[in-house]
Image (cartoon, helix red, strand yellow):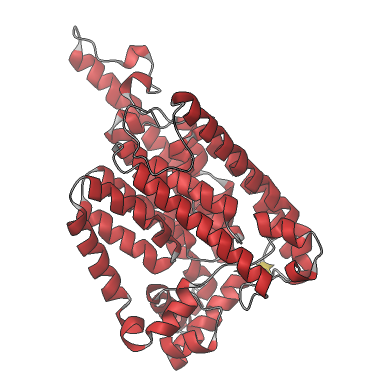
Amino acid sequence: MESTPSSPVLSPLSVSDAPSASSPQRTSTVSARAVIRPAFWITALALAAAALKIAIALNTFGTNDVVTFYQFGKALNENGLEWTYRHSISFNHPPLTAYYLRAVYQLDHQPFFRDNGLTFPFLLRVPGIIADLVTVLALCWMTRQDRQFRLPTWALVLFALSPVSLMVSGFHGNTDPVMVMFLVLASLFCLRDKLAWCGLFLAFSCQIKIIPLLLLPIFFFFWLSRRRVASFSLVFVLASAVLWAEPLLKFPLLFLKNVLSYGSFWGIWGITYWLRLTDLPMFSMVTFYHFPPLQSFVVTVLKLIIIAAVLMMAWRRRNLGKRALLDSLAYAWIVFFVFAPGVCAQYMVWLAPFILILSPTLFAWLVATSSLFLFFFYNITAHGFPWYLAISTNKLNTVWTPWTIWPWATLIIALVIFWKNAKSADASLRLFSFATLRDKMRE
């Protein structure tokens, strides 16, 4: 699997696209057209995909996540944020998501919205649909800015029309695409040396889901190596403190317990799924809370492996170029998905844009395998076509969980290949080491 070229010499442009001393104006015009035309059509396709997602959202209810979010919205309106955290262990979302759910619940009860079919399930999915479009536009912008970030047109088209995005944003009903959008924007502003915007959008991503905190060390050490970490950290901390003010000031322990300690579902993905298949009683319970002792031990070990790997990666790669920042984020996502104790269906959008930048070929394979997983997940839980309401139950998860093996195996193979390629480029490279990597090694 190739990594997207990191230098102009290895860019996907053909030789004829290179500037010529004899005709600089003509070459510049041709090059601009070569970039703008694909961007126009990719944007048009992204708009068409957004329209299709809106149509799906208007005519379906979604998954049981929509039901759960509706209940959260009701509880938040009637009893407030603290009560909801205290009485619902499944409410593991940061306050910004809570505020949005409360607002959507209120809009759902307005006659104008109900009379026009703008109900809670639709309103819940609108931000994700918009976020997908913004993410496509951001990647097109990145491609036009610098040749080292140039992506193949076919890969951007696949991203814009991704079945994974279509199913998650159009049908599922969750906030994951919004988190991804903010994380992509934080990354792109990092490339432009806009540290304030980078810190702000990274903080926003952590207000949607808590998982971007895992990637914070990559940004932190990137700016540390450039002696600008204080300004970045100040913006990130201030934005996070403002948005987390209510729980941090009024019920910090409850907030930390519900949000920061969430570990996803045991037994539906990766290592914990294979342990569950042993049929040993200590590994058989599918749950996301109150783990039995041995399950709790395994979950803790897997979390520590992920955190340690990301910290080591962030430290060792801190002095590499801007391109390496995006690659580090992709590597971190791969490590996370390989070792994660649990992965839900909608999580498959988390890593997509970063894998696209790292390796378009891997992205294509991941889209194919993830689409298989998601199709069978939704088709089984919705009891076949046409999909309207998909409810995942403990009984049904024994039917769809085998399909999670495909994307998981794809990422394991990718991890092995990337490591072998890195060793081939630098035979002195060690897996367990804190030695700082330098730009002499092409990532």
User: Looking at the image, which residue sits at the far top?
Assistant: 22
Identify whether 160 is placed above or below 209: above
User: Looking at the image, which residue sits at the far bottom?
Assistant: 79
Q: Residue at x 54, y 71 (%)?
A: 121
The total number of labels drawn is: 0
**Residue 106 shows up from this direction:** no
If the image is split into quadrants, where does the N terminus sit? top right
Q: Residue at x 58, y 54 (%)?
A: 339
Image coordinates for residue 398, horizontal then vertical, percent: 78, 62
If the image is split into quadrants, where does the C terminus sit? top left
Image coordinates for residue 93, horizontal then vertical, percent: 46, 74
Q: Is residue 350 left or right of residue 63?
A: left
Looking at this view, is 183 or 310 the one in front? 310
Looking at this view, is 280 or 385 the one in front? 280
Looking at this view, is 364 or 342 the one in front? 342
Q: Residue at x 23, y 20 (%)?
A: 28
Q: Quadrant of residue 150?
A: top left
User: Looking at the image, which residue sits at the far right?
Assistant: 279
Q: Is residue 356 left or right of residue 272?
A: left
Q: Residue at x 45, y 72 (%)?
A: 260
Looking at this view, is 434 or 167 the one in front? 434
**Residue 408 shows up from this direction:** yes
Image coordinates for residue 75, horizontal then vertical, percent: 50, 88
Identify whether 394 is placed above or below 321: below
Image coordinates for residue 208, horizontal then vertical, percent: 41, 67
